[in-house]
Image (tube, rainbow, N blue to C red):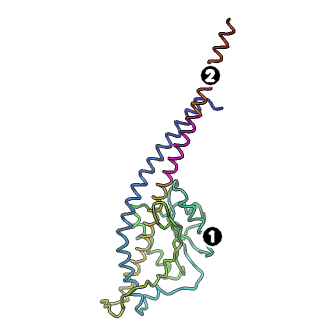
Amino acid sequence: MPSLKEIRNKISSVKSTKRIMQAMKMIATVKYAKTQVMIGSYRPYYDAYKKIISTLSKMSTKNGEKYLKSRDEDNDLLIIISSDRGLCGSYNTSLFRKIDKDDKTFHGKIYIGKKGKDYFKDKGYLEEDISFTEKNFKEVASEISPKILEKFLNYEVSNVYIGYNKFISAITQEPNIIRVLPFDTYESDSDANDVLIEPDVEDFIDIVFPQFFNLILSSIMLDAITSEHAARTAAMDNATRNADDIIKETTKLFNKTRQASITTELMDIVNGAEAVK
C-alpha cells in the first residue's frame, strides 16, 4: 500500500493537472464561440459566390472549361487539414482513419497542420510547413491557394481533394473528404442568357474562379479550426471530470490509509502499555 505522502502527492498532482485542463477548456470555449460567429458571417458570402459560379458554368467559355472539365488522369492531390497541437480527443485520429480506409490512391499530399505530417510521414507536395489559426487562416489560404491552382491548371495534378473535419455541432465533427477541383457545377435558377458581363467574360472567369477557390479553402479551414476548438473543449471537459473522479477515489484511499495508520499506532501504544504492566 502506498504511503500517505505518496497519496498526498498524487492528489496534489491531479489537482494541478485539473487546473491546467480547466484553463485549456476555457480558452478553447472562447475560441470556439468566436469561430462559430465567423462561420455564420462566411455563409452568405460563400452562397453568393456559388450563384456566380453556377451562372458562369452555364456559359460556353474556353476559360471556364479548364476549371470545370472533369479529368480522368490518375494523379490526384489530397490536402489534409489537421491540428498543430494535441489534446483534442479523436479530432485527428478519426480523420486519419478515414483517409487510410479510403479506396482512392493519392499521388501527392499537402499538409496543413503538423499532426497530419507527423502521422503520414511522407513528404508533402509543397515543401514548406503550413500552420494556421483562427487569426491567420485567410492569409494562409491566400498564400497557398494560387500554388495549388497553378499545379491544377498546368495539369501537374488531375483532381484536388481536401480531407478535414466538418463542423456539425459542439459535440459532433465529421471526418470528410471532398473534391474541390475541378469545380462542381452548382444548381441555380439563374439564366446565363440574362447576364451581361463586361468587358470580357473570359477575363472575368480568370478573376472569379481563383477567388472562389481561395474562398473554398479558407472556409474549409475555418470549419476545421472550429471543429478543433469544439473537440478540444469536449476533451478538456471529459479530462476535468476524470480528474474529479481520480481525486475523489484517491482521497478515499488517503483517508482509509490514514485511518489504518492511526489504528496501528494506537494498537502499538496499547500493546506497549500492556507490556509495561
Q: Where is residue 253, by image quadrant?
A: top right
Q: Amino acid at mark 1?
A: Lys
Q: Position of residue 184 (x, y in %)?
A: 47, 82
Q: How many marks?
A: 2
Q: Is residue 96 left or right of residue 277?
A: left
- Location of mark 2 (residue): 263
Q: Nearer the viewer, residue 147 or 217?
A: 217
Secondary structure state at the residue bearing disc 2: helix
Q: Image quadrant for the C terminus?
A: top right
Q: Main secondary structure of the magenta part?
A: helix
- Residue 247 colored magenta? yes
Farthest-out residue, top: 277
Q: Is residue 217 left or right of residue 95?
A: left
Secondary structure state at the residue bearing disc 1: helix
Eye-nearest disc, 2 or 1 = 2
Q: Position of residue 136 (x, y in %)?
A: 39, 63
Q: Which residues are magenta?
A: 235-252
- Residue 135 colored magenta? no
Q: Amino acid at mark 2?
A: Thr
**Residue drawn at 52 percent across, 86 percent down:** 70
